[in-house]
Every structure is written in structure tokens, then in C-alpha cells.
Image (cartoon, rainbow, N blue to C red):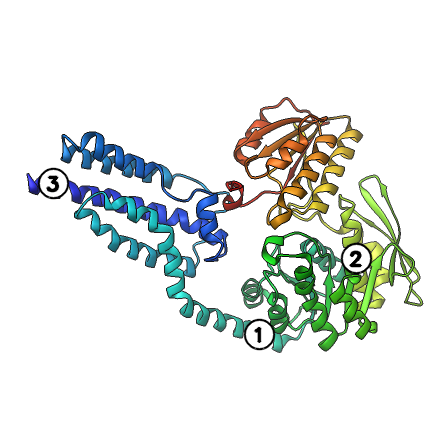
Amino acid sequence: MSVLILLSKIVFLAGFLYLLWTRSRTLLAYFQQEEYDATRFPDAILSVRLYDIRASLAIVASLLLIGTWAPIAGILLAAALIALIAWREGTYRFKKPLAMTERARRILWLARGLAGVAALSVLCSPWWALVVIQMLPLALVLANLVLAPMQQKINQGFIDEATAKLARMQPVTIGITGSFGKTTVKHILAELLEVSGPVFYSRGSINTVLGLTRHIRQRLQFSHRYFIAEMGAYGIGSIKRLCDFAHPEYGIITAVGHAHAERFGSLENTAKAKSELAAHVCAHGKGVVVTEAVAALEPFAKLREAHPGKFTVVGESETSDVQIVEAVLVGALWRITLRFNAQDGQPELTFDLPLLGAHNIMNAALAVAMVALVDPEAVARLPLATPEVSQIPHRLQKKAALAGPLILDDAYNSNETGFGNAVSVLRNVADEQGGKAILVTPGVAELGDQHSVVHERLGKLSGEACDLVVIVNPYRIPTFQRAAEGQRAEIVTKATLNEAQAYVRGLSLGAQDVVLYENDLPDVLEEKRIL
């Protein structure tokens, strides 16, 4: 009998190892989405419910209900159930799939080794499986910590290689940062600056030292005259590190707002972090372009007072260095007029911008101001170049279909200002076409203590402006749902974006209707609940 029990435990161990093998990859995908941050991942374990429930219940039920009178049968049933759970979990497809980099592979294999050793305890008693399965997320964190010194050495080697390449090629470097708008400004500037010379920049939202390092090593050429470096801030000091790496001669600060507030803690800290780009350019470079709102913030105001000749301020007031005189919609184009108050010979410029959203007026003005700063002679050629500015993927991108509604894809990231502008565009386009305005959204991410307040405002706005609002995971944004209800819009809730998209496809919508997909969160945020 004891031999049969031992054999059944070995079978159970095999099933359990299969579960650990599969579950470790699942958890690594979430850990990667949290940027391998050991301080943020434990919160995700709770809010996204990454702890095990199904396998634990299967083990308890099998060992208690059957194992009391048939121990071998109970153990074998538990093995079969957890193997089935592992198989089903292996078929799950993430919205943001796991990128199996060398770093991810090392973390995964070490975590599996640690978990595998711990799993041997089930040979003493299958009940130990309940402890080991719950400790699996911590095995990933431990593996990452153990491998950190080696990973840091590897990363530094790549960084040194990219730094040496930049030093050899010496492109004119322009840094762009801001709470929002930096990726859009980067793309607009890159296309406009092509009238002056070849431009190197990272596609999408690559804004870290390692992200830029990879693109520089793989794509930067001697023919590139300009290098535009998007700079993301994950805390005070992040931008300084990027500046020490890229050495920008010019800088653009698009905005300072509540986006990513939970990383910074306050608007003052956000402003301080973003001002690191301006401080670097003032000390070592040639010029900074900012909005009037940014220029008024304390760290920027002090820098401007100390380095008045280094700042170009863009805004609507006559005191701005580059004034937005007028912006009107002409068909699907913004016709924008700028006045260069501080530049003789370039008193005024009118150009067309084929991008939706009122926020793109300022984004384009910032880009034009930088072109004027870098190469004043190129400004005269901009009106010919601006109609060619392409739609920026997933940022109010129009996607017309042969049949069905017009899709406005604003799925990449979001912030309160951009969200409001996108909803306004949705309503206007729907009214122009005589159709319904349908919003699909999971809300905004990383708002910190502003989460509830901002979503209440956005919910009220959406409820008033739209005909239908499909809320993805309402448990994450309860104030949005409450504020949107009882107004013009019909409110529908869905657990995931896939379910929301399926619901919209099932509606009887025509070419006159418009669907806005506002923000698309990674799995770790889409599945999050407010604790």
C-alpha cells in the first residue's frame, strides 16, 4: 500500500510541476508588465488576484472529500485536476504577450528551479502544494533580485556601446519629455524636421535608457543628422539619467500633469522631474521649448529667470515667444497660424495639420517652434510638409472600414486632457455624419490619489457627450460608472476589452456611426480592482 501511495505522490508531483511550469510563465508576463518592479508587483498580486484559487480548491476538495476514504484516488484526482488547470491556463492569450528576452528567460528558469526544489515537499505530503503554489510569485521576485547584479553588468555593456556610437556619429540631439503628448510631439517633429535633414527616432513609445540603447545600437546611421530622444520619467532622477546618456542640445517639455501621479506622489515632484531636461539643456545645450503652463511652474520659472535666452514659450497669449494666433477646422484639417514674436523675418506662419483632436494644435506648435529653433531656414518649407504628417498609430487614428462604423483608435495611453479632447472629437464627428457616438474605455491609469476624482469628471463628460459608453472592468473605475449613469448615454459594462469589442461588433451600426476606443490597458491594469 505504501508503495502505491508513493507512486501516486510521484504522479501528483508530475502534475504539480506541470502547473508550476505553466503558472510561472503566466506570472512572469504580469511581472514584466510591472517592469520587474519588486515594489509594484506585490500590489498586482492582490489587485489582479494573481494568487492561486482554482488549483488550491481542487487539491483541498480532492484530498478531503475523496482522500479521507480513498487516499490514492484523492491524490490521483488532485493530480488530474491541477494538470487540467495548467493545460487550460497555457491556452490563455495576453493582450500584451510576454517578450521572452534573455533577461526574462533567466528569471523564468531560476524561478522554476526554486519552485521545483520546493515542490519536492509534496512527496512528504500533497498538502505542501498549497504553500508552494502561493509562493510562486515571490520566486520570480527572488530570482530577479539574485540575477540583478549580472543583469546590471549586461545592461551597462549595451549602454556603453550605444554611448560610444552616439559620440562617433554626433547627431543633433533633441530630448522630449512631459506627462503626456511626448510621443505625439516626437512623431510630428520627426516628420517636420525631415525638411532639414534625416531624422533618427524610436517608433512608438520607447523612452528609457535601455529602450533607446537598443534602437541606437540597431538603427542609428551616420546619415542621420538629428536624433529625437523621447524621455520617460519614473521618478526624480530618471530624466537626468537619460540626459547624461543622450546629452540633448535641445529640449521640449510638453506638459506637467497628473498622469503617472502614483509614481511621483505630487504635481510638484512631477514638475521637478520633468525640469531635469530643461536644467541639462540650460547648462550644456542651446534651447528649450515649453508651453505657457509649463513655464509658469516653479522649477521652470527659476530656470527661465536664470537662463532667459534658452527658453522658447509657446501659447495663446501675445507675450508668448511663439503665439498660437488661430486654429480652425477646415474639413479634416486643422489650419493653424503661429506668430513668432521674438524672431524678425518670420513674423507669421500658417500651415495645415491632418490630425484629429484639439490637443494636437499645441503638439504641432511645439514641434514647429523646435524646428524654428534648430534650423530657422527650414520653417518656410513647413507648410508644404505638414499635410504629409501621417496619422500616429493608436492616437486618435481613423480606421474606416468598407462596412460598419468609423473607428477612432486612441488606444495607446491616455490622460485627462487627451481623454476629454478625444470624446469631443467623437461627438463632433458623429454629429457631422449623423450617427451615434460610442465610447469604449477602461479609464486612465496611474493617477494615484487623483484616480477617483479624475474618473468622476471623465464619467460625467462621457455620459453627457456619448450615446453609448462601454466600460471595461468597471470595478477599477467605479466613480466613472456612477458619474456616467443617468445621463444621455446608455451604460454597458464588460470585464475585458475583448468582450467589449465583441459586444460592439454585435451592434447594428452603420457607416455613419463612430466608435472611439479610448485607452487600452495592459493585462495587469485592465484586470485590476480597486482594493
Residue marked by disc 2: 293
Rendering quarter of residue 55 = top left
Label 3: element kind:
helix
Sequence order check, earlier mark of 3 and 1: 3
Can residue 249 be seen here? The reply is: no
Sequence order check, earlier mark of 3 and 2: 3
Amino acid type at circle 1 is Thr
- State the SS at label 2: helix
Q: Which mark is residue 5?
A: 3
Left-right relation of 118 to 447:
left
Where 6 falls versus 382 (above or below)?
above
Location of mark 1 (residue): 163
Q: Nearer the viewer, residue 229 or 65?
A: 65
Q: CA distance from mark 3 to mark 2?
A: 72 Å
Percent coordinates x, y for residue 102 in the rendering = 41, 61
Q: Is residue 87 visible?
A: yes
Q: In the rendered structure, which disc, 1 or 2, sits on the residue that comes first in sequence?
A: 1
